[in-house]
Image: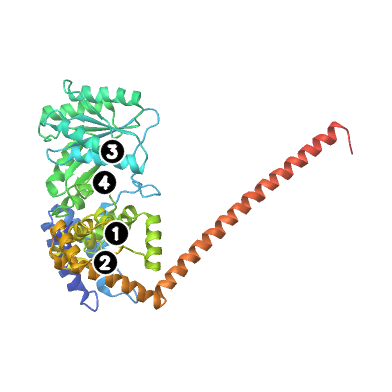
Amino acid sequence: MFDSIASRFTDVWRRISGNATITEDNIKDAVRAIRTALLEADVSLPVVKNFTERVREKALGEDVLKGVRPGEQFIKIVHDELVAMMTEPGLLDDQGRARLKFRGDRPTVIMMAGLQGSGKTTTSGKLALYLKKKWKKNPMLVAADLQRPAAVDQLEVVGRGIGVPVFADRKATPPEVCHKALEAARKGGHDVVILDTAGRLHVDDDLMREVQEIARRTQPDEVFFVCDGMTGQDAVKSAKAFDEKLPLTGAILTKLDGDSRGGAVMTVRAITGKPIRFVGISEKMDGLEVFHPDRVAGRILGMGDVVSLVEKAQSAIDEEQAIELERKLLEDTFTLEDFLSQIKAIKKMGPMSELLKMIPGASELPLDQINEKGLDHVEAIINSMTPKERRLPEQLNPSRKRRIAAGSGRSIEEVNRLLKAFEQMREMVQGLKQQGIMGKAAAWKMDRDKKKMLADQSKQLKSQKKRAKANVRRAATDLENFRKQFDLK
């Protein structure tokens, strides 16, 4: 994602970081290099001019902070301006979820519009899965693309894969399909309806009138323009044309896991005034992310994206499993079965090269030389072992190793390398344990558990005190009523 532009910005940072002071001359050189990098990324010329001028003015007017190198301060200025250019306030809630216009009186209607081949059908499925997981909604997909052959079939396959029903009527017109779908959603108890409309060019008057009719009959709460993030400012021009015919509420950029130049990401809001709401980062159905300007800015500038990396790890690795893994490492009961489960969790997070790009400074590493198949080979080798062999790898003799190598399609040398690496890892953990490092980790865990236990006990005591006070008040009231009833003093 953004490989080429990140590489160009890394060159700019390397050049300016060598300066002892910020001067008008070196700022001028840096701004010129930034302008070239943005134009090569297919960012619109007016946007580039506006952006670089703001950066230049901020850099010249900025007082150099003590303890901060001038180059680092200049990088921060560029980062902040880039974030400001892409930011739309109020689009995320406190939990980092996309804030959408959900209805209470009827199903919320989300219309997906855009050019042919932009990925609307797949993105519709991804959005439905996102709403189902993050918002606990009960969505329904609507097959309103009757132009492209097998488009309805594709959406039905997508719907089955994520467990979301698809409304389809191949004999009706798209506006009629969408109108009928709303009634079906009401009866079926669906609270969100996602309309997958046909791809169309903004110069095709007939198809544009059709999508306007769909909007008129369904009154969508959100209208997303789905555009290919690899097409640069051409996608932005199309978004602006669509916005003149439809009340767009935002854009979804797809295919950012490819060789995206970054032009559309940096230009959409500046040109159309419409914010980017989501980005597609893989072909998998969970490959839709909420758009975070600060994180994307970090990736564009080659600074990585640690927050997203941590979120991916949290979603892929269960907390209870992590605690159990920690216990096994401490007690030296970690087996190849546990190792295999960790490999599967890592693979869920995405390609290794993409994960490494989220680490600051990793853009300068030869990530294109990483063997993505390495984890697959390790997984194949372990899968070729019996359960007992995974638990007790030290019992593997030459004949067993030959069988495992043949079963996995790998060489005996690779089997031996895996076993040696696994044994070295166990020895390293035990070495850390003997040095007291793992002991500190265990002590920290025990301290954390103790604090949690004390907090739970404190919570229980507060609850008991509250109930006791209520009982005392109730007893006093009963006593007063008894006194009044029998006229006692």
**Residue type, numbered disc 1:** Lys
Picture coordinates of residue 360, whole percent (x, y): 25, 66
Q: Which residue is mark 4?
A: 286
Front-most of 32 and 473? Answer: 473
Q: Look at the picture and state if 217 lies above or below 283.
A: above
Picture coordinates of residue 6, whole percent (x, y): 17, 62
Q: Are marks 3 and 4 in contact (CB under 8 Å)?
A: no
Q: Are marks 3 and 2 in contact (CB under 8 Å)?
A: no
Q: Look at the picture and state if 121 lies above or below 4.
A: above
Q: Are marks 1 and 4 in contact (CB under 8 Å)?
A: no
Q: CA gap, disc 3 to disc 2? A: 49 Å
On the question of residue 33 being in view, the answer is no
Looking at the image, the residue that sits furthest to the top is 171
Q: CA gap, disc 3 to disc 4? A: 10 Å
The residue lying at 28 percent from left, 75 percent from top is 69
Front-most of 380 and 229? Answer: 380
Q: CA gap, disc 3 to disc 1? A: 42 Å
Side of 11 relative to 133 (left or right): left
